[in-house]
């Protein structure tokens, strides 16, 4: 079953995350707080324990980078 995993609500105990979305809504919190434009949002999709696609967005500098298998 697919789910969502975020930095703020990680896995409990010995749980494993096999399929679903992994999200870090503000990576680089310190940069964000101090106005340095290198904070970003990270999103990835994992299927059967393997990364399938990932996106990183830098909103302050209007940049998006993405990658996908295949």
Image (cartoon, grey):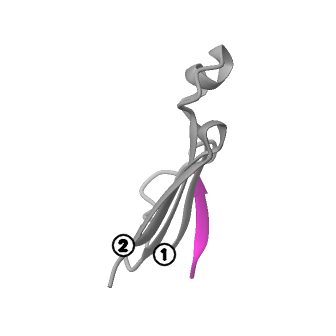
Measuring from the top left, give residue 26's x and y in whole percent. 62, 39
How would you rate the neighbour count of disc 1 (Cα within 10 Å): few for under 14, some for 14-19, many for 20 or more? some
Q: Nearer the viewer, residue 54 or 49?
A: 54
Circles 2 and 1 in contact, beta carbons < 8 Å: yes
Q: Which numbered marker is on residue 49?
A: 2
Q: Between disc 2 and disc 1, whose residue precedes? A: 1
Q: Is residue 69 magenta?
A: no
Measuring from the top left, give residue 28's x and y in whole percent. 54, 30
3D distance between C-alphas at marks 2 and 1: 6 Å
In magenta, the rendered stretch is 1-6
Q: Which quadrant of the figure contains the N terminus?
A: bottom right
Residue at image point 59% right, 28% down:
37
Q: Nearer the viewer, residue 17 or 70?
A: 70
Q: Which residue is mark 1?
A: 19
| Mark 2 element type | loop
Measuring from the top left, give residue 39's x and y in whole percent. 57, 33
């Amino acid at each position: 079953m697919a789910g969502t995993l975020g930095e703020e609500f990680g896995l409990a105990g010995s749980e494993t995350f096999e399929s679903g979305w992994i999200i870090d809504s503000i990576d680089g919190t310190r940069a964000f707080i101090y106005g340095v434009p290198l904070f970003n949002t990270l999103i990835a999709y994992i299927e059967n324990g393997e990364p399938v696609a990932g996106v990183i967005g830098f909103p302050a500098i209007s940049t998006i980078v993405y990658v996908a298998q295949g």
